């Protein structure tokens, strides 16, 4: 058997392309010495970069894109005839990073091998390539060189910095080290540092390279082929970590014992083996082993901290708006790592949106079209809503209808009453915010600190389209990311009955908010009593929505009286109660436990 | 800084020990040629093995233990002064595999390097070590050699075969290929084949070894040191896969940037790096690179199938009783892979117990003491209850009290009535079986095919102690492992109200059982009606157990009438209903929807 490998559609987070010349690359050389974090100095630095779109007169529409481990400046095609770029699906006219609106800059990173100064550059001191004399560089150094490039353009503030994986590290550095110079930060599939497991894979890869006899202590440029075997081993290993187990199963299991016949020094017995051999062999054609060592070491050395305290200290410095996204099957940069960053941002009142996107694609997801409808659209909406460039979208709900479990419970009367209970200018956390209807109204009223919490991905997209900040949190696990008394008001509208951990949710609300507004259906509403007593049926509050006792999202049943008892037992003060009969659209004052189908309560400790 | 590495307590699934001579190893040589699966022939095979305990006169108390990738015959100490064995926590007098009761045999596997014929053995044809002339061997071949050893002892039927990881593969082969010769099979942290991801790691490891110039095409024994670098790389990589991410974080994150100062050719910059370097360097002292290639290839070639049909065909051949356990953080041999085997066994009516054990230890868990209280005790109870050696334990509940969410609902009246509804000799599936009370009673009554389903680990241990077969399944995900109409009776006692997916659970019961018995609390019981109508409180059925509306395990509320409506809507036949007032211990015949607090229904399609 023999299959054509040349058009293999399986992209990777350091997407494979030929080492063709970069036709559109521009170059700038900075002659001031660059003092590196680790103490060494580079006498001068050349940067290769490509640009897309036009820098406007105010120079405030620039978007910096940071590439991943083995990427380069060629983020997208410049025209139809151009070679494909590594993020063609994201960057271009009308695409999420719209080059009709934004001036996109993508530089090759310091230490790389595609035009920017790196180990394969000539060392002025010797007149020969640096090789392993190239100093250790860090993400801090890489960003410093990018900063010089931005200065070179006369850009004071970047509209946004965007990057995934290692590029995400640069994004985090930009936003926390140059807070005044970044309006928005988009960090995809990244973390504040690698896990020890991720670090271990890098170590093994480097060991494979440096112990290849052809490595020659890094001075292989003028003698031999270079450590192609070690580099291929490192690449194979990296490749495994970029893919999800699920994606590998789908791709290789159907013909797992059938290796492809390719010319290689490596094992081809199994489908996955011949694939790895192919990827490993090709990699040496386009990437330099010393750059691989330099950049993977920069990745490993990046460490913004492992504790909540360290992270809040670092991320508390930022002044930009944030968008973070992780991918559910990414096991190299795990969702919980993005959540740690998000936690530190929300704890320090930074505007942030976050979603963990359901995906089969593993770490590579942010480069693939499969989940573009979410991470792409979130990025588009985020960029377009950053202050200073565009007004919020006209009708953010027109194309995306949130399908969150809470959205079905929104009654307009309840909605107006909750708005009335929120003091002018108050900071508000809306738990289970759906498509952001309540928050958008508050935003219109001029409230400044508004945060939504939601689980549904499309509802999150809708919120971001409205220019709102929304983070994905499972309320049943508490609100640990928020600090004590962080908000003037916390709202939980028609959601409590769907929570398993009622005690935790309520106590977390009271911890985080000075005033809590909770609304819920009342099981002791008279028609429901009648339903049980005369009809012999369980009293259910949401049958009008097509649900039955066996499939309703509700899992908790309680009356106004039950909730009052609960508050008394838990020493929670009920400051105010508004009882409603929503079927007639009226407030209820007399015997609410019998006459109201819904209650809104204002709680505090 | 410097830490002592010599007493590193971090064991591994191919546990590290010195290459000290095996003082207690015995050897037997089989002179009949061994025809291998792949077509080659070995003219004769020597097996190194160790034994513990005494073979009884009937020769029916032998337990075969199969080691993992780089293990050997030294499974445990023979006396106080002996070197430690790789499974000292499991094998010995009074331990789970009790050498006071059982005669334990542990052979080094074919292709290994610790006494049994392998690549470092002398090839009679050349008078020199085989090297890479050693033929490809498979798990089938390895088991064939073990079979010769068992014959050599005159053992007809093994009391049990036990193995984890690669040793689990051998266990699966024994039980499905020699069904008459195995009474019990204990397969820990194993699968019917590797995932493509797992296979990929093996491929990269072998590529590292074979592309090491010192490999010399496998003929390195008489010339040089051997491919120590490549072997070390493979070992480092393997090591990462044996540990969970969580375990690596716990071990290395506290001092991640502090490499230990050890003499090595590899990188020691990071804590995890110096650890891997140390493990990699040591490995070459005790293990042979050709054996690593041979055995990892045997692992990769093992493939009992990827589809349910293939697996049921293979596992349907077995005649033994089964115990399988997986570990929640094992990402090399994943829990779903054990579940696939379990599914094929239950679908073909094979007696099997299974538990996915909550663990932080990754694949190594089955070798470590952390989770021994569960996998060890399950193994002990399983071995001791295998027919023919011991009677069931006297009082299996005495030391272990199951804490499953369902156990609180057991009422003795309901219990007796359900027993009465089960015809003599019927096969029974008990969903949410707790500690196995109902099944034990049925067992006493002589029922043959009894299976329990339970989530709680300790309840599962209790069931196995009672000699029952119990598998861990989340009922909310259905009963896909069971086939249509597999059981005469399926019981779901006092559990339906805690299920989110009521429709799925009921429809799955009706698919799997000819007759279904469901019991549940009745929300329309008169005192509950009064509670709502007169008290204004939500009607809750389990307040007497200390639960409240906000923390009850119940999530579904329905009356007898509601359930009848449900059955009518879904075209489910109610063959019989028994209504109870459990507070007075009486059956209710008049207006049960008002006078009964519980109903037992017999359902069918």
Image (tube, coloured by chain):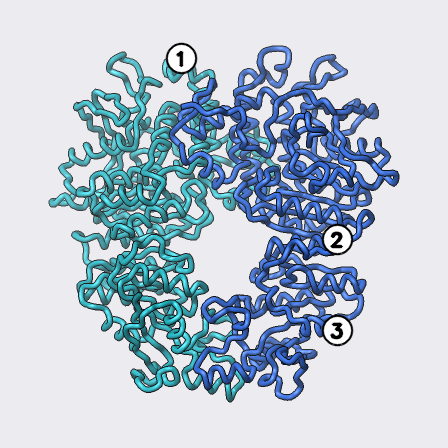
Chain colours: A cyan, B blue
Q: Secondary structure at mark 1?
A: loop
Q: Which residue is mark 1?
A: A223
- In the picture provided, is A269 more to the left or to the right than A8? right
x and y, in percent, of residue B469 in the image: 71, 55
Question: In the image, is residue B201 above or below residue A530?
Answer: above
Q: Secondary structure at mark 3?
A: helix
x and y, in percent, of residue A374 in the image: 36, 53
Q: Residues within 10 Å of mark 3 (few under 14, many from 20)?
A: few
Q: Chain of mark 3?
A: B
Can residue A264 be seen in the rendering of this structure? no
Q: Residue at x 66, y 69 (%)?
A: B510
Q: Secondary structure at mark 2?
A: loop
Q: Which residue is mark 2?
A: B393
Foreground residue among B205 and B556 = B556
Can you tell which mark lies on residue B420?
A: 3
Can residue A409 be seen in the rendering of this structure? yes
Disc 1 and disc 3 on one polypeptide chain:
no
x and y, in percent, of residue B296 in the image: 62, 31
Q: Chain of mark 1?
A: A
Q: Chain of mark 2?
A: B
Can you tell which mark lies on residue A195?
A: none
- Kindly report which numbered mark, 2 or 3, lies closer to the viewer in this rendering: 2
x and y, in percent, of residue B567 in the image: 60, 77
> Mark 2 vs mark 3: which is more N-terminal?
2
Foreground residue among B482 and B207 = B482
Whole-number angstrom distance, CA of label 1 to CA of label 3: 87 Å
- In the picture provided, is A168 more to the left or to the right than A42? right
Whole-number angstrom distance, CA of label 2 to CA of label 3: 26 Å
Give the quarter of the figure containing the N terminus of chain B: top left
Give the image quarter of residue A440: bottom left
Foreground residue among B311 and B318 = B318
Question: In the image, is residue B6 above or below residue A401?
Answer: above
């Amino acid at each position: 058997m023999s299959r054509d490998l040349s058009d293999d559609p399986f992209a990777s987070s350091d997407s494979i392309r030929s080492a063709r010349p970069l036709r559109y690359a521009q170059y700038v050389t900075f002659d001031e010495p660059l003092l590196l974090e680790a103490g060494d100095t580079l006498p001068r630095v050349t940067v290769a970069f490509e640009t897309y779109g036009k820098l406007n007169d105010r120079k405030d529409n620039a978007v910096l894109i940071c590439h991943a481990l083995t990427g380069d400046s060629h983020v997208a095609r410049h025209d139809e005839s151009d070679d494909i770029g590594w993020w063609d699906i994201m960057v271009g006219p009308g695409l999420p990073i719209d080059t009709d609106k934004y001036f996109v800059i993508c530089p090759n990173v310091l230490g790389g091998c595609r035009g920017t100064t790196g180990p394969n550059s000539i060392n002025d001191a010797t007149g020969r390539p640096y090789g392993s004399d190239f100093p250790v560089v860090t993400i801090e150094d890489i960003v410093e060189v990018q900063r010089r490039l931005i200065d070179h353009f006369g850009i004071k503030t970047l509209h946004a910095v965007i990057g995934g994986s290692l590029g995400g590290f640069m994004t985090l550095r930009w936003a926390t080290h140059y807070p005044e110079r970044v309006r928005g930060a988009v960090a995809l599939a990244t973390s504040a540092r690698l896990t020890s497991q991720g670090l271990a894979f890098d170590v093994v890869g480097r060991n494979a390279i440096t112990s290849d006899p052809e490595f020659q202590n890094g001075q292989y440029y003028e003698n031999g082929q270079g450590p192609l075997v070690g580099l291929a081993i490192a690449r194979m290993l990296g490749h495994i970590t970029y893919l999800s187990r699920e994606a590998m199963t789908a791709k290789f299991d159907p013909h797992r014992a059938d290796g492809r016949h390719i010319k290689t020094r490596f094992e081809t017995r199994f489908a996955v083996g011949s694939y790895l051999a192919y990827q490993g062999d090709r990699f040496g054609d386009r990437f330099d082993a010393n750059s691989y060592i330099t950049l993977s070491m920069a990745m490993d050395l990046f460490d913004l901290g492992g504790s909540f305290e360290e992270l809040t200290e670092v991320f508390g410095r930022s002044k930009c708006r944030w968008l973070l996204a992780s991918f559910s099957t990414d096991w190299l940069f795990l969702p919980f790592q993005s959540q740690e960053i998000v936690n530190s941002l929300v704890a320090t009142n930074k505007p942030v949106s976050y979603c963990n996107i359901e995906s089969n694609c593993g770490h590579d997801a942010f480069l693939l079209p499969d989940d573009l409808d979410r991470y792409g659209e979130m990025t588009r909406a985020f960029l377009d809503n950053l202050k200073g460039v565009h007004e919020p979208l006209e009708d953010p709900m027109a194309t995306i209808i949130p399908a969150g479990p809470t959205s079905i419970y929104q009654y307009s009367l309840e909605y107006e009453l909750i708005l009335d209970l929120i003091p002018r200018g108050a900071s508000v956390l809306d738990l289970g915010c759906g498509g952001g209807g309540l928050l958008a109204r508050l935003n219109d009223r001029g409230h400044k600190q508004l945060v939504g919490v939601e689980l549904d991905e499309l509802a999150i997209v809708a919120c971001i389209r409205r220019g709102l900040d929304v983070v994905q949190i499972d309320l049943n696990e508490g609100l640990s990311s928020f600090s004590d008394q962080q908000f003037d008001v916390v709202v939980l509208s028609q959601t409590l009955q769907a929570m398993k951990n009622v005690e935790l949710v309520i106590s977390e609300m009271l911890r985080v908010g000075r005033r809590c507004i909770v609304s819920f259906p009342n099981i002791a509403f008279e028609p429901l009593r009648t339903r049980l007593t005369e009809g012999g049926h369980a009293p259910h509050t949401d049958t009008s929505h097509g649900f039955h006792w066996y499939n309703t999202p509700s899992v908790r049943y309680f009356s106004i009286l039950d909730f009052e008892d609960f508050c008394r037992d838990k020493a929670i003060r009920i400051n105010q109660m508004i009882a409603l009969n929503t079927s007639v659209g009226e407030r209820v004052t007399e015997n609410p436990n019998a006459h109201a189908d819904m209650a809104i309560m204002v709680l505090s400790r």
